[in-house]
Amino acid sequence: MSETNAAPNQGLTNDTLIPYSKNGLWGYCNTERKVIIPCKYHLVSAFSEGLGSVCFDERFGFINATGKMVIPRKFDFASSFFEGLAAVSIKGKFGYIDKAGSVIIPADFNFASDFEGGVALIEKKGKMGYVNKAGKIVVPCKYDAISTFKNGVAIAEIGGKEVFIDLTGKETETPPDPDFRDGLCPEYSEEFDAYGFINEARELVVPHTYEMVNDFSEGLAGVCDNGLWGFINTKGEMVIEPKYADVAMDFREGLALVFIDDEELGYIDAQGNEYWD
């Protein structure tokens, strides 16, 4: 990987705590791979909003940057904090807590995503909807599937029919505009049966050569070539060679989570440095 093609290490300093796995256990290291918080957990998340989710003996809690457990390990599952709230599972149901560990939105859902733009995708009784940070269901749980909102509009499926809905849950005739991230948007070509990227002028910037692609995030996009995933920059240059089984999380604050193989996960930075042994 050449230095000219590599994306900058956005958000990473030597003080950044990076999830690090060794011998099947997880802790945190710095950018020089020096272990700062010992590898003693069965699973950890990247730090977000000052806290990291950690799991030991199938119970999740949160630690701060010193490694102190500040929210006790009492959850079946806990995601990272986004917009001040984290999705947690309590007795098989999902809800949301704040950074004090208080339940803000009761655990009443079968699934709950991270908050983005003030709303989060939820599932109840097999149907999908959206909830806001006050706990109000703004899009009723009646849809078989819903996309993320793009420019205030989402694509939903109900009874085999595709509809467009806005952030109030009302159906609209207007489809969502293309969602340009870092100035580019994925485009599928039936002719080539492959994906590429267009810019806001609808010009093809990255040729239709990939089996699957993700949106750009922090200047990089995951792309699948011959069944393996790597990352390209906004010029279409391959900066992290395709060698991973999948991408579990696109780049956030300088880190991406990838499937090393069909089961094992690991974190990489924008330079392609791998944080596992």
Image (spheres, rainbow, N blue to C red):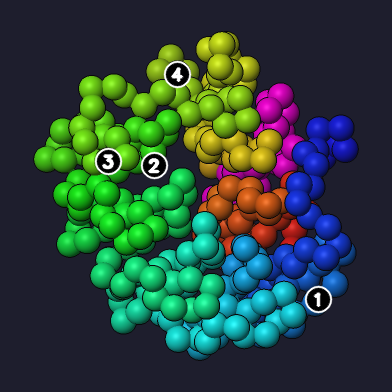
| Upstream in sequence: badge 1 or badge 3 | 1
Mark 2 or mark 3: which is in front? 3
Q: Name the residue under label 1.
A: 35
Q: Main secondary structure of the magenta part?
A: strand
Please state which amino acid type lies under the numbered disc 3. Answer: Thr
Q: In which quarter of the image is residue 81?
A: bottom right
Q: Residue 148 carries which label?
A: 2
**Residue 30 % position (x, y):** 81, 67
Q: Is residue 105 left or right of residue 42?
A: left
Q: Residue at x 38, y 34 (%)?
A: 152
Res. 205 visible in picture = yes
Quarter that holds the C terminus:
bottom right
Are the residues flagged by discs 4 and 2 in contact, CB closer than 8 Å? no
Going from N to C along the chain, the mark reached first, 2 or 3, is 2
Residues at marks 3 and 4, CA–CA distance in whole angstroms: 33 Å
Say which element carries label 3. Answer: loop
For residue 263, say whether it is visible. no
Determine whether 268 is above or below 204 in the image. Answer: below
Q: SS at mark 1?
A: strand
Disc 2 crowd rating (10 Å Cα; few below 14, some 14-19, many 20+) is: some
Q: Which badge, 2 or 1, comes first in the chain's sequence?
A: 1
Q: Which residue is drawn at 61% across and 56% down?
A: 257
Q: Nearer the viewer, residue 179 or 206?
A: 179
Q: In the rendered structure, which amino acid carries the disc numbered 2?
A: Thr
Q: Nearer the viewer, mark 2 or mark 1?
A: 2
x and y percentages locating residue 273 in the rendered image: 78, 54
Question: What range of the chain is rendered magenta?
Answer: 228-246
Kindly report which numbered mark, 1 or 3, lies closer to the viewer in this rendering. Answer: 3
